[in-house]
Image: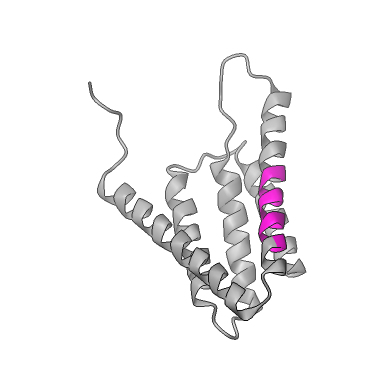
Amino acid sequence: MRALWFALTPSLILGLLLTRLISLPQSDYYLLAASVFIGSIIALRPPRLPLSILIFAALLVGLFIGLASTAPSLPGMKTHQMAEHLVAVALGSGLMLVSAQVIAYFLNKPWQGLAVRILGAWITAGASMVLALMLLVPLSPLKP
């Protein structure tokens, strides 16, 4: 698990710093695709999944979360407020990861592992449906 922390944290910080330089168009697609990938890994739970695949997934997720978390460009918004936004995103992402690890730590019995796999299947199903709808119906402003 430490290897995943060491992969996710720098990629998240890199993604957050890159938001100041580049803008990722339609970043929701990337986040949903990453959710489908991670949810599938959790649901399928292959017996001997190589650590390199998990590290790659952590790198992608961290980068996509960072790039999708651009600070809003509002008139009168100061630089320190944008920096506070980026720090809040980093702390919130870390808190979510710690929460998931704590829950998985306490669910260590075989029948409880089934609940984690079901949750992964629901994440995959939900992200797949939203991604399919977004791809079929392009995002456009509502017309009166």
Residue 76 against residue 119 in the figure, above or below? above
Residue 82: percent from the left, percent from the top?
67, 28
**71 or 49, which is in the foreground?**
49
**17 or 104, which is in the foreground?**
104
Residue at 42% in and 56% down? 127
Residue 55: percent from the left, percent from the top?
64, 69
Residue 7 visible within the image: no
Q: Quadrant of residue 17?
A: top right
Q: Residue furthest bottom?
A: 48
Q: What residue range appears in magenta?
A: 91-102
Q: Residue furthest left?
A: 144
**41 or 34, which is in the foreground?**
41
Q: Residue furthest top?
A: 76
Q: How many marks?
A: 0
Quadrant location of the C terminus in the rendered image: top left
- Using residue 102 as the reference point, say whether residue 123 is left or right of it: left
**27 or 142, which is in the foreground?**
142
Residue at 63% in and 19% down? 77
